[in-house]
């Protein structure tokens, strides 16, 4: 499977910043700025770059509006204040940055995955995130999702064994089954097995008949048909919102994602600002 072609890593930078905020030691620099999450981000991205198969990558960030006022010490404010430095960290490491304004980081990752998988230059495309929304982008073993916390890789065989549907059907599945973690209510009575069975037969919500006799492959067809008829418009809205935009105007050419080297001037400035001097010995050992 494209073994000789370069692997591409597409990283959910927003998730990484939040993960580092909670997982790295808090640190206030000499200017009174909280910079602990950015210090952690520098370390985790450097760890990724050190891997032998990481030579092409991009990092996408959601738009994180600036916190209002300097006295707000809420978690959200502390993270948002570090967002500009987080973007500078990616630039300083010489990594392609995709900062979003109107869309979400997920949309950028979906766009990159689609564009790269449609071409013949890239090998495996690895989406680095813990957000299951990106499961809809999985294609065979070519486009996979890597959870960097657990190390779990989800390809299409794994996805199908877990959900019983094809990856592009995942927005339909979420709309029917719901997700407590995402605040999606779903259609009452429609559980995972029911949704997988009906989507396996009809493909999507739009093509699913509302007549009870059409749903007799599952138990309680009359009740399920009535619930779907009542919630169909809502389910279609949820599906539309859950489907990622994969057509953003991003430069997804393989050569545009090739990692060259760190920008030592920018990195030196950033390390001084975040007081992460312990990073230099790691860099020196890595680049010997």
Image (spheres, rainbow, N blue to C red):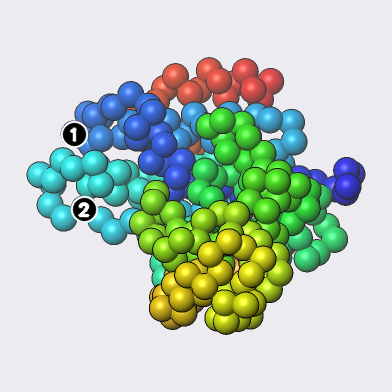
The reply to whether residue 4 is visible in this rendering is yes
The reply to whether residue 89 is visible in this rendering is no
Q: Residue 74, image x and y in percent?
A: 18, 42
The residue tagged 2 is 67
Nearer to me, 88 or 242? 242
Q: Quadrant of the C terminus?
A: top right
Q: Residue 168, image x and y in percent?
A: 66, 64
- Asked if residue 216 is positioned above or below residue 140 in the image, the reply reads below
What residue is shown at x 73% (from left), y 60% (from top)? 116
Pointer 2 local density, CA inside 10 Å: few below 14, some 14–19, many at least 20: some
- Asked if residue 174 is positioned above or below residue 79 in the image, the reply reads below
Mark 1 residue element: loop
Q: Residue 132, image x and y in percent?
A: 54, 50
Mark closer to the observer (1, 2): 2
The residue tagged 1 is 32
Pointer 1 local density, CA inside 10 Å: few below 14, some 14–19, many at least 20: few
What residue is shown at x 78% (from left), y 53% (from top)? 140
> In the image, is 251 to the left or to the right of 156?
left
Mark 2 residue element: loop
């Amino acid at each position: 499977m494209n073994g000789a072609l370069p692997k591409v890593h597409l990283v959910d930078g927003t998730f990484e910043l939040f993960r580092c905020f909670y997982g790295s030691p808090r640190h206030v620099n000499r200017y009174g700025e909280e910079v602990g999450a950015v210090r952690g981000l520098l370390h985790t991205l450097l760890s990724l770059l050190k891997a032998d198969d990481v030579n092409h990558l991009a990092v996408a960030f959601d738009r994180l509006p600036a916190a209002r006022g300097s006295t707000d010490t809420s978690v959200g404010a502390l993270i948002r204040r570090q967002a500009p430095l987080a973007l500078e960290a990616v630039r300083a490491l010489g990594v392609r940055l995709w900062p979003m304004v109107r869309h979400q980081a997920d949309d950028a990752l979906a766009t990159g995955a689609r564009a790269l998988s449609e071409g013949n230059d890239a090998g495996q495309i690895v989406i680095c995130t813990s957000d299951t929304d990106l499961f809809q982008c999985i294609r065979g073993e070519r486009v996979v999702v890597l959870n960097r916390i657990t190390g779990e890789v989800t390809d299409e065989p794994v996805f199908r064994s877990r959900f019983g549907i094809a990856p592009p059907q995942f927005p339909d599945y979420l709309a029917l089954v719901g997700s407590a973690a995402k605040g999606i209510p779903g259609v009452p009575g429609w559980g995972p097995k029911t949704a997988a069975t009906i989507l396996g037969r009809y493909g999507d919500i739009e093509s699913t008949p509302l007549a009870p006799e059409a749903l007799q492959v599952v138990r309680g067809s009359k009740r399920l048909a009535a619930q779907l008829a009542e919630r169909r418009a809502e389910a279609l809205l949820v599906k539309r919102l859950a489907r990622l935009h994969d057509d953003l105007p991003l430069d997804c050419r393989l050569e545009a994602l090739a990692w060259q080297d760190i920008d030592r001037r920018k990195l030196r400035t950033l390390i001084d600002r975040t007081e992460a001097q312990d990073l230099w010995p790691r860099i020196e050992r890595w680049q010997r």
